[in-house]
Amino acid sequence: MTRRWFPLLLGLAMATVWAAQAAGPKYVFYIIGDGMGVNEVNATELFYGELAGRQGPERLLFSQFPHSAFVNTGSASSDITDSAAAGTALACGVKTRNKMVGVDADSVPVYSIAVKAQQQGAAVGIVTSSEIDDATPGAFYAHQGNRNNRYEVGLDLLATGFDFYAGNRFKQPSLPGRESLYDLLPKRGYVLATSVDDYQRKAQKAGKMVLFPERSITYAIDRRPGDMRLADLTRCAVDFLSRNERGFFLMIEGAQIDWAGHTRDGATDLREVKDLEESVQIACDFYRAHPDETLIIVTADHETGGVVLGTGEYALNLQALQYQTMSGSTFTRQIADWRRAGEPVSWERVKTALSQAFGFWSHLTLTAEQEARLKRVYEETLLNPSDTLVQSLYEANEPMTETAKQIINEIARIAWTCGSHTAGYVPLYAIGAGAEKFGGTIDNTDIPRIVSEIFGYE
């Protein structure tokens, strides 16, 4: 990725901020890396620095923005938030209890900054690499006491009526005796597209659009040629929303950083942070064309996994993660295929698979203890058939998968304190109109309030 323009961009940011306030900003990019704490950003930069052959970070595009802050993420019910309460804080500027989305702690509906933008005549888009009815996107349009009321969240999506929605398909598109959300889409004026080409064919004649990829967005590490990516959804959203002369509000969520953190999959996690940068690049390209009317915010709802950079030695070896070629969940599916075939699985076959998936023996040297650990798990779960899986929030993985991830993390010298959320600060980075209002240590509820002030939303 070229950054030759970025020093000029920073100069523009500082030189035009007063003109931005005078002219009145029109465009908001609100980019949320779900689960992306300070150490996830730092680890990604150090990883790519090592790959470039030097000590020190390869700076991500957004970490070079001229304004930054630390953000507290606690909810009304706990210092450790879930995504529903955190999303509600980021969207609505109100603390609520964990699992509640778009309502306050007393279950009273609260309305998001995206709704305020809509009321001001701006176009609104919601883009995510998770299901469109998941907690973070839902916080911008839904009002539910329980984030798991997915069908009702989908109904709220239609009722709120934003201009553009994109992400993986509804998790609960229907209930017994209730009309399918897919049947309701055209009745509410939405045109459904399933690919970039399909979007381009339909967009000109559509008043509102939903873009659901035929094949769900996968981890970046597992991506195959032809798979849609978060950046594809972002590009379509910008194209569609830009038709509104009164501006737009676009929320973009990189959801799968959180998924990888829950399963403590270091190589997958860092690639998800890097993948989010592609959408930030699209936002920055737009900013270059509209520097005095655009605000870009990159932040997170919470940290996931409690990742620690260093395990006792005064050294890191993050470059070892480059040899992991698939996510843990994909490796688990490979083992599941072996089980379905019903054929004996030899230790040599397992070693070959581990070499291909994690670089063991071919690129990374294992200690005798690490190899013995893998062999023991093989004997307990593959040589003697077992249906024991290790459950995280979004995945259930084979014990062999979990052991392999633990070992490559050990080699890289990173550790995870848990498989859930933590109370750690998350970063915020901002550039553009009014970005100088962000700084220091703030609360997550402050962010939409500041954006409202900048853009004159009620």
Image (cartoon, rainbow, N blue to C red):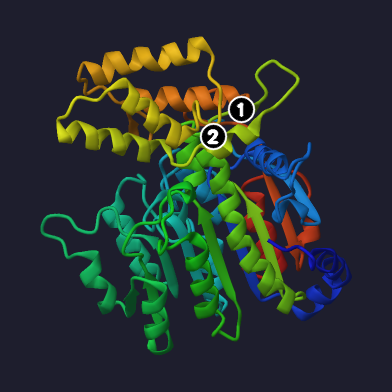
Q: Quadrant of the N terminus?
A: bottom right
- Residue at the spot 67% in from the left edge and 23% down from the top edge: 310
In the shown orientation, is residue 389 left or right of residue 229? left
**Residue, far bottom:** 205
Frontmost residue, 138 versus 364: 364
Instruction: Please state the total of marks drawn on the protein image.
Output: 2
- The answer, for residue 413, to whether it is visible in the render is yes
Frontmost residue, 271 versus 192: 271
Q: Secondary structure at mark 1?
A: helix
Q: Quadrant of residue 342?
A: top left
What whole-number distance in Å separates the C-alpha atoms at marks 2 and 1? Answer: 9 Å
Classify mark 2: residues with Cα within 10 Å, few (<14), some (14-19) or many (20+): many
Give how far across and how far down residue 301 sits, in percent: 56, 45
Picture layout, residue 220 above or below residue 341: below
| Residue 266, label in figure | 2
Determine whether label 2 and label 1 are within 8 Å by CB.
Answer: yes
Q: Quadrant of residue 9?
A: bottom right
| Residue 412, label in figure | 1
Which amino acid type is shown beneath numbered disc 2? Gly
Give how far across and how far down residue 339 sits, in percent: 20, 31
- Residue at the spot 62% in from the left edge and 39% down from the top edge: 40
Picture layout, residue 358 above or below residue 96: above
In the shown orientation, is residue 244 left or right of residue 193? right
